């Protein structure tokens, strides 16, 4: 199979994954379907890749993230129970202002992601209190955290995230390889993310969408 056709199939698999998740399909189910598409063209064939490489990788990922995500959830529950999440949120929003606190969320997420820690497990406990204080829906914070996490784990030179460390080890380079391109990409991506965050906040304000607490209040600011 030609490289061009392989590339088209990979792009198709990514497009299918994005389409299915946007339509509301469970992320894991969408990932299985996209993986099945790619497995047909992968070396060693469909069976070896779908039921070997993919399942082994999923098991390794779940095992690696179990403790961080569990600790992050527990951290959020503690902040919520003692009121520290609300107090932290009010303090940061008052310090940065309701228009600029979102940039603090981006900065903290970038710093966490560069250390290799999973921001998606930790940041809800930190930023939900800010969103509650600013009366913004939780999806605003999570959209920004997801964007900053992608930047911190893939484009910043020297990041210790698995997305940078594993390829470096396989290729035989260090984590700073391609630093010039990485820096340029990082700057561009951060600018785009900041613009998106401002537009998203402005839209929620215009539509008068306020904070949406979590049922049971088991996370900070809930």
Image: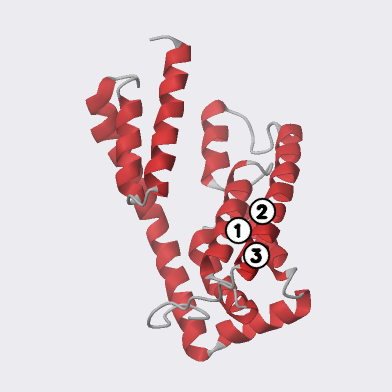
Q: Earlier in the sequence, mark 3 or mark 1?
A: 1
Q: Residue 212 at x, y = what percent? A: 49, 75
Whether tag 2 and tag 1 are in contact, CB under 8 A, the answer is yes
Instruction: Give the Cα distance between marks 3 and 1.
Output: 11 Å
Q: Residue 147 at x, y = what percent? A: 59, 52
Question: For the residue labelled by badge 2, is the local secondary structure a helix, a strand or a loop?
Answer: helix
Label tally? 3
Residue 109 image-quadrant placement = bottom right
**Dot 2 surroundings within 10 Å: few (below 14), some, or many (20 or more)?**
some
Question: For the residue labelled by badge 1, is the local secondary structure a helix, a strand or a loop?
Answer: helix
Whether tag 3 and tag 2 are in contact, CB under 8 A, the answer is no
Task: Report whether residue 59 is seen.
Answer: no
Residue of label 1: 144
- The residue closer to the viewer here, 122 or 159, is 122
Q: Nearer the viewer, mark 2 or mark 1?
A: 2
Q: Residue 8 at x, y = what percent? A: 45, 20
Residue of label 2: 196
Residue of label 3: 201
Instruction: Give the Cα distance between marks 2 and 1.
Output: 8 Å
Give the residue at x 53% y 42%: 163
Q: Residue 117 at x, y = what percent? A: 54, 58
Give the residue at x 33% y 51%: 26
Question: For the residue labelled by badge 3, is the local secondary structure a helix, a strand or a loop?
Answer: helix
Whether tag 3 and tag 1 are in contact, CB under 8 A, the answer is no
């Amino acid at each position: 199979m030609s490289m061009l056709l392989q590339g088209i199939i990979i792009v198709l698999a990514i497009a299918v994954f994005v389409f299915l998740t946007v339509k509301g399909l469970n992320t894991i189910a969408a990932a299985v379907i996209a993986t099945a598409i790619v497995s047909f063209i992968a070396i060693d064939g469909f069976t070896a890749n779908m039921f070997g490489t993919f399942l082994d990788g999923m098991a390794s990922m779940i095992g690696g993230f179990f403790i961080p995500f569990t600790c992050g959830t527990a951290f959020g529950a503690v902040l919520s129970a003692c009121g520290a999440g609300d107090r932290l949120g009010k303090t940061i929003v008052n310090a940065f202002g309701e228009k600029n606190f979102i940039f603090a969320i981006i900065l903290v997420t970038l710093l966490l992601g560069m250390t290799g820690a999973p921001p998606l497990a930790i940041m809800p406990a930190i930023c939900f209190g800010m969103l509650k204080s600013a009366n913004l829906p939780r999806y605003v914070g999570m959209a920004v955290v997801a964007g900053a996490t992608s930047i911190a784990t893939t484009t910043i030179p020297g990041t210790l995230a698995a997305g940078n460390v594993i390829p470096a080890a396989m290729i035989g380079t260090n984590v700073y390889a391609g630093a010039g391109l990485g820096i340029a990409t990082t700057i561009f991506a951060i600018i785009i993310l900041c613009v998106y965050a401002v537009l998203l906040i402005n839209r929620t304000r215009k539509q008068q969408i306020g904070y949406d607490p979590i049922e049971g209040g088991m996370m900070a600011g809930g």
